[in-house]
Image (cartoon, rainbow, N blue to C red):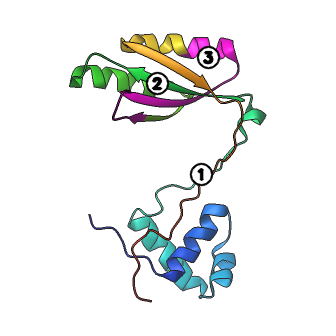
């Protein structure tokens, strides 16, 4: 599927929605300088094109008693479809696991998870054992220096107005 072409209105809408997805169509339209109906159509098109694929509310993890973020490096010596499916089933059933990436280089997988504390991490670690792993290494976030969910839009394909 070809990547959609974004014009300046689309970019402005996306910038606003990335900062605050609760803005009304009217607020967005006013800030962008287009009519409500044109704004609504553009947002619908961005959703149809999968540029906007989800709208969520971000929570403060400390306020929901999950203050500790851990990055878990996984190596396996089983590079086959059967093992990969089993690993996928294990991680999908763990709500503390937020992100999982298959990696190039020395790591096979990188996992981002949140836990309540070290005993909570130990429980999480033990749940990974069902996946028959070769090596697990974890690093804990001591300080978050930057965190954003906003993607820079200057790299998107530009269209004429």
Tell me the CA gap for discs 3 and 1.
Answer: 26 Å
Question: What's the mark number on residue 73?
Answer: 2
Q: What stretch is highlighted in magenta?
A: 101-124
Does residue 129 sit above or below 11 in this rendering? Answer: above
Question: What's the mark number on residue 137?
Answer: none
Does residue 132 sit above or below 46 in this rendering? Answer: above
Circles 3, 2 touching at the beta carbon (< 8 Å): no
Quadrant holding the C terminus: bottom left
Q: Which residue is drawn at 46% across and 24% down?
A: 73
- Indicate the position of residue 56 as horizontal and vertical percent values: 59, 51
Q: Which of marks 1 and 2 is nearer the N terminus?
A: 1
Q: Is mark 1 on a helix, strand or loop?
A: loop
Is residue 83 among what the camera can see?
Answer: yes
- Indicate the position of residue 131 as horizontal and vertical percent values: 38, 15
Does residue 77 sit above or below 24 in this rendering? Answer: above
Residue 95, by quadrant, is top right
Question: What's the mark number on residue 56?
Answer: 1
Q: Residues within 10 Å of mark 3 (few under 14, many from 20)?
A: many
Number of callouts: 3
Tell me the CA gap for discs 1 and 2.
Answer: 27 Å
Is residue 138 highlighted in magenta? Answer: no
Judging by the rendered image, the residue that carries numbered circle 3 is: 121
Q: Which residue is drawn at 45% across and 68% down?
A: 155
- Indicate the position of residue 4 as horizontal and vertical percent values: 36, 71
Residue 145, by quadrant, is top right
């Amino acid at each position: 599927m070809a990547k959609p072409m974004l014009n300046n209105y689309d970019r402005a809408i996306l910038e606003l929605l990335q900062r605050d997805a609760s803005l009304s169509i009217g607020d967005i339209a006013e800030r962008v300088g287009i009519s409500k109906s044109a704004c609504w159509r553009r947002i619908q098109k961005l959703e149809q094109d999968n540029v906007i694929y989800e709208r969520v509310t971000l929570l403060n993890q400390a306020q929901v008693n999950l203050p500790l973020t851990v990055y878990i490096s996984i190596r396996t010596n089983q590079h086959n479809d059967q093992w990969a499916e089993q690993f996928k089933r294990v991680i999908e059933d763990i709500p503390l696991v937020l992100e999982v990436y298959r990696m190039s280089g020395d790591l096979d997988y990188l996992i981002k998870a949140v836990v309540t504390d070290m005993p909570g991490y130990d429980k999480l670690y033990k749940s990974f054992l069902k996946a028959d792993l070769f090596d697990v290494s974890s690093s804990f976030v001591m300080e978050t220096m930057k965190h954003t969910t906003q993607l820079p839009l200057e790299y998107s394909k530009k269209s004429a107005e």
